[in-house]
Amino acid sequence: MIEINKNKIEKIADVNRKLLIELPDKTKVPIIGQGTWYLGEKSNDRAREMAALKLGIELGMTLIDTAEMYGSGRSETLVGEAIKGIRDSVFLVSKVYPHNSGLNNIFSSCENSLKRFGTDHLNLYLLHWRGNVPLEETIEGMEKLKKQGKILRWGVSNFDTEDMEELLECEDGSNCVTNQVLYHLGSRGIEFDLLPWQRLHKMPIMAYCPVAQGGSLRTQLLKDSTVKKIAENHSVKPLQIILAWCMRSRNIIAIPKASQAEHVLENAEAASIVLSESELDELDKVFSRPTRKVGLDIV
């Protein structure tokens, strides 16, 4: 565990507390939060992961995203322990499985998540991806959960443009506040139609895997000469440039995962990196904007 000067933590936190995005209901949330995929699955890692989450909160990354799917609820339990005593300072997000999003299961699924968190409400509840349950039924369940006070707002995840258009045609579909999708420098497909559509409807994107999931693509991004050169210009790491790029427009919520304090600190610092127009142009030349519709990337 690294030692981080308290003054440094507060300085970074002060910057991040001011970098906010407004949801359709006027609620303001940080542009950078914390993802938790794969966290809570190994008991030997629990103390380290807990410390990482708590540090992230201290650094102003108070939006925490998880799901009932992650570790079969173990991620939610870990988050619940990490926010104990500071629940009101956290914007808590979880996701329901598609097969649990109908009226027969959504209420028990939500209640089980709340028990694991040790709280009485979620700030945001998402449909994890689209399944066989009719959208109208899921929306009805979400709206009832809102009336019960179990969730304050709801959204979706892994929805493409046609899905979003269909959603808004449903009764109360316009109450959706966000769509969480994969988005990073090496996966820019949403820029062709989904991202403009969401901006038109004043509904921010929440970007998962904003520095790409581990593997060859992430390695390619981190080793790219242009990314490395820009990182050197800012005296930061390539990963921080990739993350800063995702948040460049200040209207996307990035939720990078970090299970170690060092990486949490790097993520928190990335939010304040401002890339110049020339640097953005250089990155566009290497990682081109889409010129046609492509299928939504999902991991």
Image (tube, helix red, strand yellow):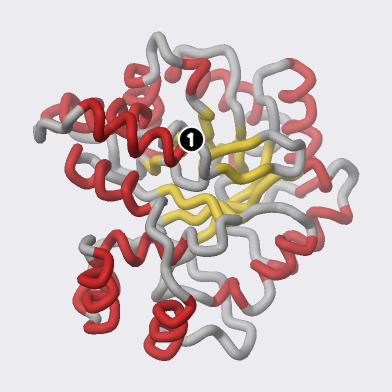
Bin the neighbour count of mark 1 within 10 Å (Cα to Cα): few under 14, some 14-19, many 20 and up.
Answer: some
Front-most of residues 205 and 18: 18
Front-most of residues 257 and 69: 257
Is residue 131 shown to the viewer in this render?
no
**Is residue 262 found left or right of 91 in the rendered image?**
left
Is residue 42 shown to the viewer in this render?
yes
**Is residue 170 found left or right of 294 in the rendered image?**
right
Rendered location of residue 241, percent (x, y): 33, 65
Q: Is residue 179 above or below residue 230?
A: above
Rendered location of residue 249, percent (x, y): 56, 63
Rendered location of residue 11, percent (x, y): 33, 35
Quarter placement of the C terminus: bottom left
Residue visible at 66% across and 25% down?
A: 151
Q: For residue 244, what is the image quadrant?
A: bottom left
Residue visible at 78% across and 63% down?
A: 200
Element assignment for label 1: loop
